Amino acid sequence: MTDRIAPRKVRCPACGGESVYSGANPYRPFCSKRCKNLDFGAWASEGYRVESQPTPDDDEESAVPPPAAPRR
Ligand SMILES: [Zn+2]
């Protein structure tokens, strides 16, 4: 009988190495804390990049002359 639960191993999304996917590994599915931070950093910067995409509105704004009409 197999009383023991074999630890499931997955591939670490950050380094591609083997990572233990179990409660013993708080960083799952990553193999280590460093890999988790690495992946999170990449994910975060990617998200920011998507959010700061140039929009046509930006172009239009620069084409419009500033409302500089000094009154006398
Ligand atoms: Zn890793």
Image (cartoon, helix red, strand yellow):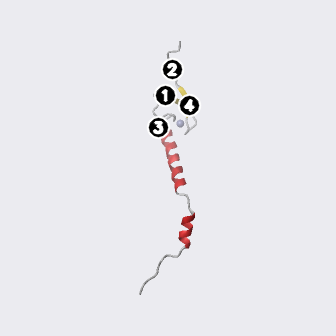
Q: Position of residue 30 (x, y in %)?
A: 51, 35
Q: Residue at horizontal 56%, vertical 62%?
A: 55
Element class at badge 1: loop
Q: Point out the tag, 2 or 3, that comes first from the N-terminus.
A: 2
Dots 1, 4 in contact, CB < 8 A: no
Q: Position of residue 25 (x, y in %)?
A: 47, 30
Gap between marks 4 and 3 measured at Cα: 15 Å
Q: Point out the tag, 1 or 3, that comes first from the N-terminus.
A: 1
| Of the pair 7 and 67, the residue shown nearer to us | 67
What residue does disc 2 label? 5
Element class at badge 3: helix
Q: Specify the amino acid type for callout 2.
A: Ile
Element class at badge 2: loop
Q: Which mark is residue 33?
A: 3
From the image, state whether disc 1 or disc 3 is nearer to you. 1
Dots 1, 2 in contact, CB < 8 A: yes
Q: Specify the amino acid type for callout 4.
A: Val
**Circle 2 residues within 10 Å: few <14, some 14–19, many ≥20:** few
Q: Specify the amino acid type for callout 3.
A: Lys
What residue does disc 1 label? 22
In the rendered view, tell whether residue 51 sits above or below residue 71.
Answer: above
Gap between marks 1 and 3 measured at Cα: 14 Å
Q: Position of residue 42 (x, y in %)?
A: 52, 47
Element class at badge 4: strand
